[in-house]
Image: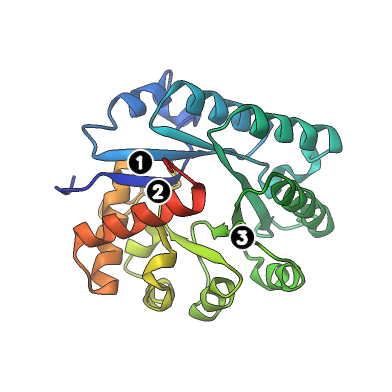
Amino acid sequence: MLKQSGMLIDSHAHIYDEQYGEDGAQKIISGMEQDGLEYIVCVGCDMPSSFTCAELAKNNARIYATVGVHPYDADTVTDENIQKLHELAVVCDKVVAVGEIGLDFHRSGSDKPLQISAMQKQYDLARELKKPMVFHQRDSYGEFVEFAKTRDFPDGAVLHCFSSSKEIAEHFIKKNFYISFSGTVTYNNAVNLVRAAECVPLDRLLIETDSPYLTPAPKRYGLNYPKNVALVAQRLAEIKGVSYDEMVRITNENAKRIFGINQ
C-alpha cells in the first residue's frame, strides 16, 4: 500500500459482491481508515444490489450509494422497478447518482433495442431526480455517442472504467462528463487509455477500482479491493505529471463535486 498524506475516494466499487465472502462489505468498511480511504461510492448494478448499496450507505458514514440496473439486466427495467428506484433515491439521502446504467454489447446476441430502452428509462429517472448518471459502456461507444447527441446531462455524468479512445473522452467531456479510470490504466498494454488520460482535464478525472474486478498491476488477476485505488492514483499522477498527493487531492475534489459528497 502506498503511503499518502491524503485519504482516497474510490468512486466506484461493488463491496457487497459475494466474492468477498460473508460480511465482506463490513470487513472492507471496518478497514477503511487503515487502508487510507475517506469514502467509497458503492454502486448498484441490479435491483437487489441497489437496495444493498442504499442500506450500506445509510448505516455507514464513509459509504455513499448509487442505484441502477446494468445493461445485462435490462429486462428488469420495468416501470414498477423504476418507481422503486425513484423511491429508494428519495428516501435515502446518501444515494448520489443513478447507475451503473448503459450499454454492453460484448456478449453475442445482445438485445440492443432493449438495452437502449432500459438506459433511456434510467436517464429519465436521473433527470427527474436531478442526480448525475454513472454509465457503463462496453463495445458500444458508437451507439452511445448517438444516444447522447440529442440529450443533455445538466447534473453531470460519469463514464466509469473508461475503455475507449482519446477522441471519445474529449467528446464526452464537452457533454459535461467526468472520465473515470480503473486498474486497467496501469496495465502494460494500456496505450490508448494513457493517451485518453493525457487529454482529460484534471478537473474531470475520477479514480475507481470497480472492485472486486480489474485489479491494478502489479496485483493483476487477484481479487480487487477499494484500497487498490491508490495504485490507479499513482499511475494517473505519472501520466499527468503531478505528485501523487496532488492527484489524490484533485480526484477527491472531483468526486465530492460530481456526487455532492460532504457538501
The amino acid sitting under disc 2 is Thr
Q: Secondary structure at mark 3?
A: strand
Q: Earlier in the sequence, mark 2 or mark 3?
A: 3
Q: Are marks 1 and 2 in contact (CB under 8 Å)?
A: yes
Q: Quadrant of the C terminus?
A: top left
The image position of residue 92, as x and y in percent, is: 59, 28
The Cα atoms of the two marked residues, 1 and 2, are separated by 6 Å
Q: Quadrant of the N terminus?
A: top left
> Which residue carries the number 1 mark?
226
Numbered disc total = 3
Please rate how many residues cluster around mark 3, counting C-alpha atoms within 10 Å: few if below 14, some from 14 to 19, many from 20.
many
Q: Are marks 1 and 3 in contact (CB under 8 Å)?
A: no
- Residue shown at 60%/31% (left/top)? 49
The Cα atoms of the two marked residues, 2 and 3, are separated by 16 Å
Query: Residue reaching furthest bottom?
Result: 167
The image position of residue 153, as x and y in percent, is: 66, 62
> Which residue carries the number 2 mark?
209
Q: Is residue 230 left or right of residue 52?
A: left
- Residue shown at 58%/77% (left/top)? 171
- Residue shown at 67%/32% (left/top)? 90
Where is residue 183, by image quadrant? bottom left
> Which residue carries the number 3 mark?
137
The amino acid sitting under disc 1 is Pro
Q: Check the image and report above or below for 168 versus 105.
A: below
Q: Is residue 9 visible?
A: yes
The image position of residue 214, as x and y in percent, is: 42, 51
Query: Residue reaching furthest front?
Result: 263
Q: Earlier in the sequence, mark 1 or mark 3?
A: 3
- Residue shown at 50%/48% (left/top)? 259
